[in-house]
Amino acid sequence: MTVTTTEHRVTTELSGRPLAAEIRRRTGERAAVLGAAGARPRLVVVTATDDGSTLWYVRSIAKAAAAVGIACDIADLGPEASRTRVRDRLRALNQDPGVHGIILQTPLPDGMSPAELAVEIDPAKDVDGANPASLGRCAAGLPGFAPATAEAVVRLLDHHGVDLAGRDITMVGRSVVVGTPVALLLLERHATVTVCHSRTADLAGHTRAADIVIVAAGVPRLVGADHVGAGAVVIDVGTNATDDGLVGDVDAGAVDGVAGALTPVPGGVGPVTTALLLAHTVQAADRAAG
Ligand code: NAP
C-alpha cells in the first residue's frame, strides 16, 4: 500500500501485529536451527527496580522469547542494587559465551545513568542498541544493533509501503533510545528529517508541514488535529499509563479523518519492538556461532 498525502476520508490503521508475527516466525525458525546445533540463543534482561509495570513488561519479553525457542533469564538485582553491582553483572554477561543478548532494563535506581552503564554492554550482545557505540555504528553504516523501538518504527513504515526517500518527516522527541536513533535511521533512508523537542517553538507548525509525523514524547495526547496535515502518516510511539488505560502521545480520536494513516496504541510499534529484540538475539547468536 502506498499512503498518499492528498485528499482523503478515512484514516488507515497501521497495525504492527502482522509484521511482529512474521518477525517472530522467522526468528523461531532460525532459533530452532541454532538450538538443534547445540547453540540455543540466550537473552538476559538485567533489572534493578521494583516498578510493577516494568517487571510485567520484562516477563512479557521472557514469555515471547520462550515462545520462539530463545532462552531468557531475568537477572533481577533489585531496587537497592549499587552501580558497581550492575556494572559487574554486565561485565560477567559479556564474558559468558552462553549469553548472546543483554538488555539493561530501565528505570534504574535513582542517580544511576542508563547511558553510563550501557557503555559496559558488549556491542555484539547489545540487542537493544543501548550502548552509545551501537548508535554510532548504525550512523556510520557499520554492523551493529539499532535500538529496537527505533528500528521498529522504520520497519513498520516499510511494511505498510510508506516511501521514505525525499519525504519530509518530523520526529517529536530526541531521546537517545527513540527520537535520535529514529532520525538517524531515517536520514540513512534519504528522508528530510526535522527533530522537535520540549523547547521547540512551534511544534504544530513543524508537524503540520510533514508528510510523516513520528511522536515519542511520553506526553499523553500531545498531538491533536491541529498538529497533523491532511493525509499525513502518523506513527505513535508513546505508551502512557493513564486513568483511561494505555494511551499514546497522539489523540487518536482527534486525528481520525485528518491523518491518512495512524498506528494504534497498543498494537502498533510495541509488538514490533519486542519481536525485534528477539530477532536481534538470534542474529547475535548466529554471529557468535560463526
Ligand atoms: P524521554 O526520554 O522522556 O524523551 C521524551 C522526548 O520528548 C524528549 O526529547 C523531550 O524533549 C520530548 N518532549 C517532551 N515533551 C514534549 C513536548 N511537549 N513537546 C515536544 N517534545 C516534547 O522518552 P522516551 O524514552 O523517548 O519515550 C517516549 C515515549 O515512547 C514514552 O511514552 C515511552 O513510554 C514510549 N516508548 C515506547 C516504546 C515502544 O516500544 N512502543 C519503547 C520506548 C519508549 P527534551 O529532550 O527537550 O526533554
Image (cartoon, rainbow, N blue to C red):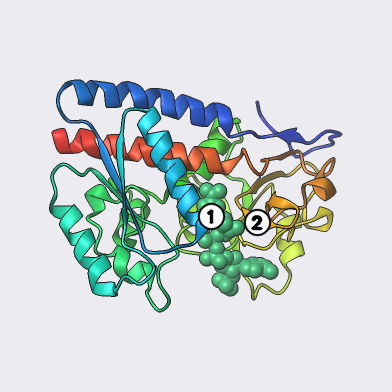
Q: Quadrant of the C terminus?
A: top left
Q: Are marks 1 and 2 in contact (CB under 8 Å)?
A: yes
Question: In this rendering, does residue 200 appear at all?
Answer: yes
Q: Is 75 in front, or is 136?
A: 75
Residue 53: numbered disc: 1
Q: Is residue 34 left or right of residue 68?
A: left
**Kind of residue sitting beneath label 1:** Ser
Q: Is 230 in front, or is 16?
A: 16
At a point 16% along the width and 38% down the height, the residue shown is 288
* 200 versus 122 height, above or below: below
At a point 16% along the width and 41% down the height, the residue shown is 98
Which residue is label 2 attached to? Answer: 241
* 135 versus 99 height, above or below: below
Number of disc labels = 2
Q: Is 6 in front, or is 237?
A: 237
**Kind of residue sitting beneath label 2:** Ala
| Rendering coords of residue 203 (x, y %) | 72, 66
Q: Is 238 in front, or is 6?
A: 238
At a point 37% along the width and 28% down the height, the residue shown is 68
User: Marks 1 and 2, how far apart in space?
Assistant: 9 Å
| SS category of the residue bearing label 2 | strand
First in sequence, mark 1 or 2: give its number. Answer: 1
Label 1 CA crowd tier, 10 Å (few <14, some 14–19, many 20+): few
Q: Is residue 251 left or right of residue 139?
A: right
| Rendering coords of residue 187 (x, y %) | 49, 51
Q: Quadrant of residue 280?
A: top left
| Rendering coords of residue 190 (x, y %) | 50, 46
* 4 versus 224 height, above or below: above
